[in-house]
Amino acid sequence: MPSLSEAYLSHPVHLHHKHQDFNSLQELPDSYAWTQVDEHHSCNNYRQGVPVVDLNDPNAQKLIGHACQTWGVFQVVNHGIPMSLFSDIQRVGFDLFSLPLHQKLKAARSPNGVSGYGRARISCFFSKLMWSECFTILESPLHHFLQLWPHHYSKYCDVIVEYEKAMKKLAGKLMCLVLGSLGILKEDLQWAGPRGEFNGSRAALHLNSYPSCPDPDRAMGLAPHTDSTLITILYQNNVSGLQVLREGEGWVTVPPLSDGLLVNVGDLFHILSNGLYRSVLHRVLVNRNRQRLSVAYLYGPPQNDKISPHVKLVGPTRPALYRPVSWSEYLGTKAKHFNKALSTIQLHTSINSLFDVNESHNNSFRVN
Ligand SMILES: C=C1C[C@]23C[C@@]1(O)CC[C@H]2[C@@]12CCC[C@@](C)(C(=O)O1)[C@H]2[C@@H]3C(=O)O
Ligand SMILES: O=C(O)CCC(=O)C(=O)O
Ligand SMILES: [Fe+2]
């Protein structure tokens, strides 16, 4: 079975456009001008928007279950991550993205690779470019950080290692809560481990930068997508821009909480929950004045495990809606089919169309 770093070997992405030094642009080039076809509904009172769950609340599991079922996303507070780690990871991000372009390109992601500097992988599905740049780390950042900071790489590596360690622990805890809300115990998942430490799990750390933009109403930071993960844990600096699509409501802005982390259901959890917890479509808008930074911890199963609808969630009235799939296989499928990836592995077309959020929302944003 291919490892995560080999997921795209047969789906290279050649991004033809030249990379951009965003700071040098006073006007939005046509190649970045999107036609927005939907209004930007934004909900400013977060208590009525995306649910916020206090992990110290004795009802946390139930609240998380409700949030996953109704929103596919929630924010957590009292998660145990020290604020200093957020400042440290923010520093890494700002220092990295403010390097001169020629320096960043020394650590460029290869067309069929996962890690390194570049544009969002999904860029190839759109004729317009996104107003963002990103950097993906798979396990160790050493190789690329040596190229970016030949003399100072080690302090940056230390922050990444510490951040990944803290996220892994939190992800295990969140997995137990999300699974628990579906009646699935750690004993029911072979790779959860006896204490729910999910040791074999794999993850990618993905830093996004959205520079301030001269014409934000016509630009797109990150186009609507779902994540190919079990769950994603997102840190956003205190600049808003992230929106999630809520059925019947439209795009809802997720205001950053200084002490909060956003957790969203990814496609692999959508599969594992047999469509009960649906992966959430989200996008990022940009603004005129401030650079936005986010750090996504993209969390998935062990290399050799296939994810399939859990036996406890399958029965005569609810057959398995998806076939088993490994993370790397799914990433390859996503690289080929983008937002139709989930439906390509569905087993029961007629039932599934009721549950497949990707398919139904795929046309709600016109691709230029
Ligand atoms: C493991 C991965 C998931 C991801 C592609 C990647 O190889 C690393 C970055 C991830 C990300 C982040 C932005 C949105 C997204 C769709 C993309 O283009 O790159 C996701 C990918 C995903 O979840 O499918
Ligand atoms: O920048 C954000 O808020 C979201 C980033 C995101 O969706 C991703 O990295 O998958
Ligand atoms: Fe995402």
Image: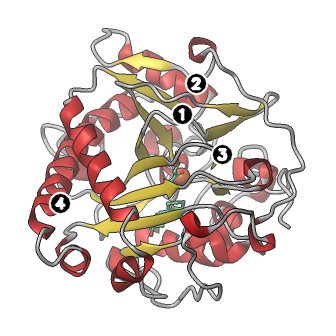
SS for tag 1? strand
Q: Is mark 3 within 8 Å of ligand 2?
A: no
The answer to whether residue 182 is seen in the rendering is yes
Residue 340 place in picture, x, y as percent: 71, 65
Q: Residues within 10 Å of mark 2 (few under 14, many from 20)?
A: many
Q: CA distance from mark 1 to mark 3?
A: 27 Å
Q: Answer yes or no: do the residues labelled 2 and 1 have beta carbons within 8 Å? A: yes
The image shows residue 193, relative to residue 211, as above or below, that is above
Residue 1 seen in render: no
User: Which residue is drawn at the image coordinates 65% and 19% (left, top)?
Assistant: 44
Reading the chain from its start, which is encountered first: label 2 or label 4? 2
Q: Which mark is residue 288?
A: 3
First in residue order: circle 2 vs circle 1:
2
Regarding mark 2 in the picture, which secondary structure is present there? loop
Q: Amino acid at mark 4?
A: Tyr
* Residue type, numbered disc 2: Val
Q: Which residue is mark 4?
A: 156
Q: Quadrant of the C terminus?
A: bottom right
Mark 4 CB lies closer than 8 A to ligand 1:
no
Disc 1 target residue? 73
Residue at the spot of label 2? 50
x then y, percent, for residue 12: 53, 88
Q: Quadrant of the N terminus?
A: bottom left
Callout 2–callout 4 Cβ contact below 8 Å: no
Q: What SS does tag 3 mark?
A: loop
